[in-house]
Amino acid sequence: MSEKQMPERWVGREVMVARATSTEAELVNLEGINDWGVVCTYKEAEVSEPVLIPWGSLSWVRLAVQEEVQALNGGDSDE
């Protein structure tokens, strides 16, 4: 599998995104990836409409680990 295919496999999962202008990462649900950037929904938002974060605005994107998800959800677990 090529590196380019890897992020597409993350669609539907929780990921951490770091914006170029922020010092902290955010937990989001990855809804899609395209030439413009990543499409995600924020877990803490009152409205769960998808948003596009352009590639130029991102420092990095990676899969979230269970400990991060639990910590950011106040210790709650979906399992």
Image (cartoon, grey):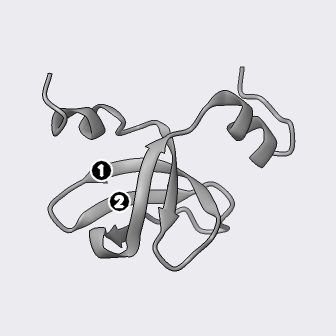
Q: Closest to the observer: 46 or 27?
A: 27
Which residue is labeled 1 in the image?
32
Q: Residue at x 29, y 68 (%)?
A: 55
Q: Is residue 39 above or below residue 61?
A: below
Q: Position of residue 49 (x, y in %)?
A: 47, 66
The amino acid pointed to by label 1 is: Gly
Neighbourhood count class around disc 2 (C-alpha, 10 Å): few under 14, some 14–19, many 20 upward = some
Neighbourhood count class around disc 1 (C-alpha, 10 Å): few under 14, some 14–19, many 20 upward = some
Q: Is residue 65 above or below residue 31?
A: above
Q: Is residue 50 visible?
A: yes
Which residue is labeled 2 in the image?
39
Task: Tell me, yes or no, whether the two marked residues, 2 and 1, touch with CB atoms within 8 Å.
Answer: yes
Circle 2 — which element? Answer: strand
The amino acid pointed to by label 2 is: Val
Q: Residue at x 32, y 59 (%)?
A: 38
Q: Is residue 51 visible?
A: no
Q: Residue at x 63, y 70 (%)?
A: 23
| Image quarter (top left, top right, bottom left or bottom right) of the C terminus | top right
Q: Position of residue 12 (x, y in %)?
A: 41, 37
